[in-house]
Amino acid sequence: MEEAVKILIDELRVKIIDTLNLEDIVPDDIGEDDQLVGGELGLDSIDVLELVMMIEKDYSVRIDNKELGAKVFANLRALADYIQEKSPGLSN
């Protein structure tokens, strides 16, 4: 895996925990290929909305429709790949 994506995945693990105030969850609990919405983390549509706002604020990346959101939030790797591709502040 590309090093920049790995760093972004590690960063996103921490941001997800902080943004959603997930207690009893540590970054290593969130696997790269684990389902985010409806998976073991128990994320719901409100959580996704909070994450969308964090991603827009921190990475200047918009996720502006439900179909895109379902694809992007499939797992941590899909989210990181999308941010890496669309963020003007990250090298592609």
Image: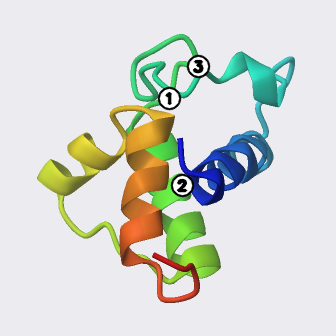
Q: Amino acid at mark 2?
A: Leu
Q: Are marks 1 and 3 in contact (CB under 8 Å)?
A: yes
Q: Are marks 2 and 1 in contact (CB under 8 Å)?
A: yes
Classed neighbour count for the residue bearing mark 3: other residues with Cα under 10 Å, few (<14), some (14–19), many (≥20): some
* Residue at which label 1 appears: 43
x 60%, y 66%: residue: 54
Q: CA distance from mark 2 to mark 3?
A: 13 Å
| Dot label at residue 51 | 2
Is residue 49 rendered to the left or right of residue 90? left
- Tell me: residue 41, above or below residue 92: above
Q: Residue furthest bottom?
A: 88
* Image quadrant assignment for residue 61: bottom left
Residue that mark 3 sits on: 41
Q: x%, y% of residue 29?
A: 73, 17
Label 2 environment density (alpha carbons within 10 Å; few <14, some 14–19, many ≥20): some
Tell me the quadrant of the picture where the C terminus can be found: bottom left
Which amino acid does the dot numbered 3 rest on? Leu
Q: Are marks 2 and 3 in contact (CB under 8 Å)?
A: no
